[in-house]
Amino acid sequence: MERKEFKAESKRLLEMMVNSIYSQKEIFLRELISNASDAIDKIYYRALSDDSITFNKDDYFIKVTANKEDRTLTVSDTGIGMTKEELESNLGTIAKSGSLAFKTENESKDGHDIIGQFGVGFYSAFMVADKVTVTTKALGEESGYQWESTGADGYTILPIAKESVGTEITLKLKENTEDESYDEFLEEYRLQSIIKKYSDFIRYPIKMDVTKRELKEGTEDEYEDVIEEQTINSMVPIWRKNKNELKDEDYTNFYHEKRYGFDQPLKHIHISVDGAVRYNAILFIPENIPFDYYTKEFEKGLELYSNGVLIMEKCPDLLPDYYSFVKGMVDSEDLSLNISREMLQHDRQLKLIAKNIKNKITSHLKTLLKDEREKFEQFYRSFGRQLKYGVYSDFGANKEDLQDLLLFYSSTEKKMVTLDEYVSRMKEDQPYIYYATGESYARIEKLPQTEMVADKGYEILYFTEDVDEFAIKMLASYKEKEFRSVSSGDLGFEDDEQKDTAADTDEQKELFEHMKTILDGKVKDVRASKRLKSHPVCLTAEGEVSIEMEKVLRAMPDNQNVQAEKVLEINVNHDVFDVLKASFESDKDKVDLYTKLLYNQALLIEGLPVEDPVAFSNDICKVMA
């Protein structure tokens, strides 16, 4: 028996592969099973061109066997096997892949694809094993061979008697340490979970002897352990089945089996693309928002498979942030993977897939809105905020995609409406799309600022979420109609009564200037209102920052100094203004008192905190005294 050295550089290279390339030790089982699947595929390819070979899929399988006493784990297959030369070439040279060479020679035959490309996966076994033994017999050969290695020091090859064609890889597991327990790879439940996680959709059966607890024959209460060979993987993935064969419950079962959520999926999207990049995908729009959705612990992303083998549990690059709630998977034959098959080598294909997925989600959401409005509104209650973030983020780059999916509560319809529905009902003389902000629909309805717009018969959209106004500011307009807050300085219209009072008289100017001085920089201006009818006072804002935006921004750590340019508007047709005028002529101290009260009243109406509650209380007492 001759010991041979590895042709690759050596110890350092093997150590790097074992310790650096793979992020999790459990990956070794995925790699060995994928190699076993490749070996069976090679017989299939050979059968396509060799009439003497009959390929009966039922005869081919992979088996995983754990021996706790010997602390060995064996992965065997009924594949093509290896000759002595192939053992030396494929296993004696680190990073030399027989699968890659075979794939190149037999490109794209009948839809079967060889998974292995780099020839590194086999060596992942050394992450968990001190010694690896490979016994194999190649198709058409008389004898078999045994390859054995304990690591970078080299390997041995010797001929052996082996009856059946195929390969058997036996791992002598490392001894446990304080930091690592290798016994887990001998436990049935652990091996089953790894197989289900990574290799559930390998196209050949992956078998294991599974222990079952059964009632002992002839007894009523005695149980015994029974060993039964079971197929662990499901083999045919749902995404490769014909859509016409599948029912809604099949997709729902898949959703729960993959643990995408405990709720019922609201909508599923089954995609099969055979173009510049080939891929299959099944996407789900959940019914409920995940409990951790708006926390830093939440991770977006879809499961990513390459030829049915799980590569990444969450691939964030497949989804834009505004669709981060989407669950599901993507399987592609065209991904360029790195040496560990855990990451993508370059992302051109991934970008094409991601763009297509984004467009598909948008299209399906629009269809849901059009055809199943109740379902869409249910979805929107959970994830509408995320769509608004999508409009606002990236400097509005995605607003064209998302604007037709937005819903807001309507003052006239008393329900959620789209922007398109709003614009379709606009009166001929209506210059803007009007909106109002507040904590609730009830509070917005009572805002003084809505009075004039509502009296004109114009519909108002109610914004109750902190992101609403930011999204609309980014949107700016819809179908050439600008958005305008009911609290803005210019509403775009005045009735005859407002025209008479719009221009402040000299007397009013003097009074308002005095009130502005009393408020000492708290407001930019005090002026006669063009919008108030029955209410005495309100606050409006000039500039880009509205009062509602000020509230949101100042709640953030680094925006304490953000301030809207507030204007205190006085209804000059209200009895309160008559009292103000009379006091200004006879008792300036009362004007000071009334000014402070009106300002604090306007703050409370806007949902803003009164700056000095004690002083406000004292001012009320002075009026009552």
Image (cartoon, grey):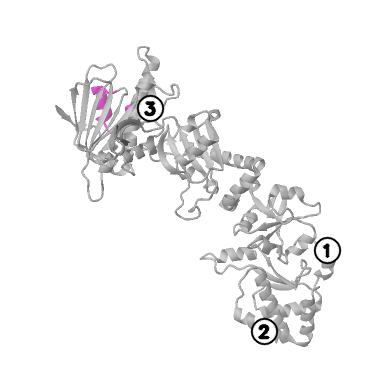
Foreground mark, 3 or 1? Answer: 3
The residue located at (77%, 60%) in the rendering is 454
Look at the numbered disc 1 and give the secondary structure of its residue: loop
For label 3, the residue is 204
Up-down relation of residue 307 to residue 604 (above or below): above
The residue located at (27%, 41%) in the rendering is 127
Question: Do the residues bearing badges 3 and 1 touch, measured as CB atoms within 8 Å?
Answer: no
Point out the image quarter for the C terminus.
bottom right
Question: Do the residues bearing badges 2 and 1 touch, measured as CB atoms within 8 Å?
Answer: no
Task: Where is residue 586? Give x, y as percent.
Answer: 78, 87
Residue 46 found in image quarter: top left
For label 1, the residue is 495
Look at the numbered disc 3 and give the secondary structure of its residue: loop
Task: Where is residue 211? Give x, y as percent.
Answer: 30, 36
Label 3 sits on what residue type?
Tyr
The residue located at (33%, 44%) in the rendering is 24
Residue sticking out furthest to the top: 52
User: Is 87 inside the magenta-drawn segment?
Assistant: yes
Point out the image quarter for the N terminus.
top left
Judged left or right of residue 508, residue 21 is left
Q: How many labels sit on residues? A: 3
Label 2 sits on what residue type?
Cys
Q: Residues within 10 Å of mark 2 (few under 14, many from 20)?
A: few
